[in-house]
Amino acid sequence: MIGAIEKVLFDPYPLRSITQHIIKRFKIGAYEWRIGRGAVERPHYGYCVFQGALLAKKLGYKKISVIEFGVAGGKGLLNLEYHADQVTKSLGIEIDVYGFDTGEGLPEPVDYRDLPYHWKSGFFRMDLDELRRRLRFAKLILGDIRQTSKDFCRKYEPAPIAAVIHDFDFYSSTASALRLFDVAEKYVLPRVFCYFDDIVGTEVELYNDYTGERLAISEFNGAHDQMKLSPAYHLLCQKAIEPWYHQIFILHRYNHARYNDFVSDEFQERPVE
């Protein structure tokens, strides 16, 4: 009880947070409206799925794929199913959901870049039977990401990837996961909405630009001339900044045949006042 009171007292936007909680708790309003106010479970998941699907719809796609790298216990993948289902109802876009994991928890850290002072092998082990029982339509892809990322498109022929949730924790695993974008353009949208779970943290993790997921992002950008991951600056200039806004990145594939297709408002003229 004391913790809840402290949370309200020290919240810079207490009325906003309370309103979000009420809307989320009682599912007030249409899903699309709730997404726009961050009033859903895992709003960062919902944001990426909804915005990826919205871009796909503007470009005329009928079906997309969304991915979670790092399934662990499965709560995130189950939530991703929920958002995919709601976005399909809202926008009419068919969505396939894929979850990548070893199934055995975290592997051994490769070196200091995987932050062994914070992560241990075996963390986040999956109860595979229970998760498969609860999943409705998401596909689990189990194994070493260095191999599964290479085989994914050949084995599954996925619809274009529109959103990716990165939660592999390690630098090494995230670097391997990002190689999934090195595929034919038919498998990705020209812009892909991405969330990186482990790039902010606390005084314990002390994430920085030279280890972990941030290093994987930096090296990916350095290795690609025609693909770049960029922060979502449009979120970072909002009046109220949610912590997860700092964790949204957009993959831009500049040489994609559809990259320059017009998707903005047709009428942008401003009358003289």
Image (spheres, rainbow, N blue to C red):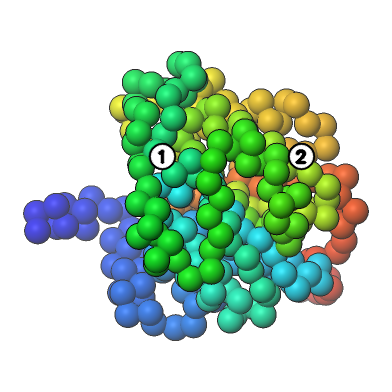
Of mark 2 and mark 1, the one earlier in the sequence is 1
Give the residue at mark 2.
182
Q: Quadrant of residue 224?
A: top right
Callout 1: helix, strand or loop? Answer: loop
In-front residue for pair 78/5: 78
Q: Amino acid at mark 2?
A: Asp
In which quadrant of the rendered image does the N terminus lie? bottom left
Q: Quadrant of residue 63?
A: bottom right
Q: Taking 218 as reference, is 255 left or right?
A: right
Q: Taking 183 as reference, is 22 left or right?
A: left
Q: From mark 2 to mark 1, how far is it between C-alphas?
A: 26 Å
- Farthest residue toward the front? 129
Q: Taking 148 as reference, is 77 left or right?
A: left
In-front residue for pair 134/115: 134
Q: Residue at x 56, y 36 (%)?
A: 144
Q: Residue at x 71, y 52 (%)?
A: 155
Q: Quadrant of residue 173?
A: top right
Vertical order, 57 against 196 (above or below): below
Q: Residue 207 in the image: x percent, y percent?
A: 44, 28
Give the residue at mark 1.
104
Q: Residue 142 in the image: x percent, y percent?
A: 53, 46
Vertical order, 168 against 97 (above or below): above
Q: Residue at x 32, y 80 (%)?
A: 26
Q: Amino acid at mark 1?
A: Glu
